[in-house]
Image: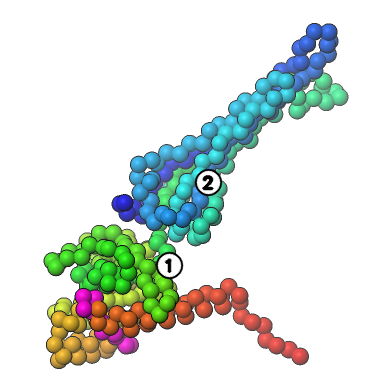
């Protein structure tokens, strides 16, 4: 299945059916009176988060979604049938934006969450509705309301507990393949991943989801390479795992390049908790490893872990550090939802 995280759709709700002007006409009934029914309601357009989807590829092949209009009313007090609703099934984590790609309409964050995007038009009243003691033979009926037509953008931001960041060939896909059942493309020659991959990782009996984000290069925020358009997928992550290629000539420059792109992207991405790891240490001798580790710790201002995705050296320790940050984030979110406890007063 191809990965698609941005799609443009055109939607239109159904118009309401018109009311009917009709009179009861039966033999031997002199004053039958009005019996025109109301029109049916037009179908609405909804978006709903469903399980089992992690891409918007379905909207690559169908962009237009038009709900059915309501059926007009008929004589003998018959109300027209309502038009069928349309439900756009989207993966959890989808943001729905207006045509300007800036105005947020909805954020589908839970399975089963349903959002109304375009309401169907109401059906018109038939002449039976206007009957009164002073107007016993009304010859008027209302037309149905028109439907709503909109152009929307669907933008997917994968929901993962941790996000993998690093320069191209830093070993992110190898790390994901070594710690989960995900099978991203890995090879002995240099190349970069072109779309995010998700993997479920387990450590000490606890599972969490890691997203492998395509590698960034200097100037990605200005559109170089594949740009920073995939960084939105780590906005929802609790922690970022920053892998630095130990075989690089200048590990400090690689580290600062990624940090600079996070800051240029904006938002709170640069402020998220980070676990920094020097990768591919199995390819370094002891002296070179110690030198690069010290330089990286000085640049980052914190602890830097050592690991190797190929030999699986240090993987468990890195996963435990990531899991600890995820647990801390969940505690902070719970406290924020519950609010600060009130001070006790006698």
Q: Nearer the viewer, residue 259 or 67?
A: 67
Residue appearing at x 18%, y 87% in the figure: 289
Whole-percent x and y of residue 317? 33, 83
Q: Is residue 168 above or below residue 136?
A: below
Please, what secondary structure does the residue beneath circle 1 have?
A: loop
Proximity of marks 1 and 2: CB atoms separated by less than 8 Å: no
Residue 39 seen: yes
Residue appearing at x 67%, y 22% in the figure: 74
Whole-percent x and y of residue 122? 63, 35
Dot placed on the residue nearer the N-terminal end, 1 or 2 = 2
Name the side, left or right, on which 92 lies relative to 258.
right
In terms of image quadrants, where is residue 60?
top left
Prevailing secondary structure class for the magenta stretch in the rendered image: loop
Q: On residue 236, which mark appears?
A: 1
Whole-percent x and y of residue 82? 61, 33
Q: Nearer the viewer, residue 187 or 219?
A: 187
Furthest residue toward right: 133
Q: On residue 46, which mark appears?
A: 2
Q: Nearer the viewer, residue 224 or 158?
A: 158
Q: Nearer the viewer, residue 149 or 341?
A: 341
Quadrant including the C terminus: bottom right
Q: Is residue 310 magenta?
A: yes
Please, what secondary structure does the residue beneath circle 2 have?
A: strand
In this picture, which residue range is highlighted in magenta? 302-311
In terms of image quadrants, where is residue 53?
bottom left
Residue 216 seen: no
Residue appearing at x 38%, y 74% in the figure: 202
Q: On residue 254, which mark appears?
A: none
């Amino acid at each position: 299945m191809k990965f698609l995280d941005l799609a443009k759709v055109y939607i239109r709700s159904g118009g309401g059916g018109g009311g009917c002007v009709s009179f009861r006409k039966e033999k031997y009934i002199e004053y039958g009176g009005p019996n025109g029914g109301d029109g049916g309601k037009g179908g609405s357009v909804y978006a709903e988060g469903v399980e089992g989807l992690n891409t918007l590829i379905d909207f690559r092949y169908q962009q237009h979604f038009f709900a059915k209009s309501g059926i007009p009313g008929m004589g003998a007090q018959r109300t027209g049938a309502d038009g069928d609703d349309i439900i756009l099934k989207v993966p959890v984590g989808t943001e729905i934006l207006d045509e300007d790609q800036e105005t947020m309409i909805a954020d589908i964050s839970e399975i089963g969450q349903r959002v109304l995007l375009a309401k169907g038009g109401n059906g018109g009243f038939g002449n039976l509705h206007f009957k009164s003691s002073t107007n016993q033979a009304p010859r008027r009926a209302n037309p149905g309301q028109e439907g709503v037509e909109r152009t929307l953008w669907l933008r997917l931001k994968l929901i993962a507990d941790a996000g993998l960041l690093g320069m191209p060939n830093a070993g992110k896909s190898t790390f994901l393949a070594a710690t989960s059942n995900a099978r991203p493309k890995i090879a002995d020659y240099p190349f970069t991943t072109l779309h995010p991959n998700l993997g479920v990782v387990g450590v000490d009996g606890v599972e969490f989801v890691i997203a492998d984000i395509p590698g960034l290069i200097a100037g990605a925020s200005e559109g170089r390479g594949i740009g920073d358009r995939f960084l939105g997928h780590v906005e929802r992550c609790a922690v970022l795992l920053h892998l630095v290629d130990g075989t690089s000539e200048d590990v400090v420059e690689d580290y600062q390049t990624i940090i600079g792109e996070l800051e240029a992207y904006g938002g709170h991405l640069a402020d998220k908790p980070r676990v920094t790891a020097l990768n591919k240490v199995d390819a370094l001798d002891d002296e070179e490893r110690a030198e690069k580790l010290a330089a990286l710790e000085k640049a980052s201002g914190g602890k830097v872990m050592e690991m190797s995705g190929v030999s699986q050296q240090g993987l468990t320790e890195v996963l435990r550090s990531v899991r600890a940050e995820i647990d801390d984030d969940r505690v902070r979110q719970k406290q924020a939802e519950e609010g600060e406890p009130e001070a006790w007063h006698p």
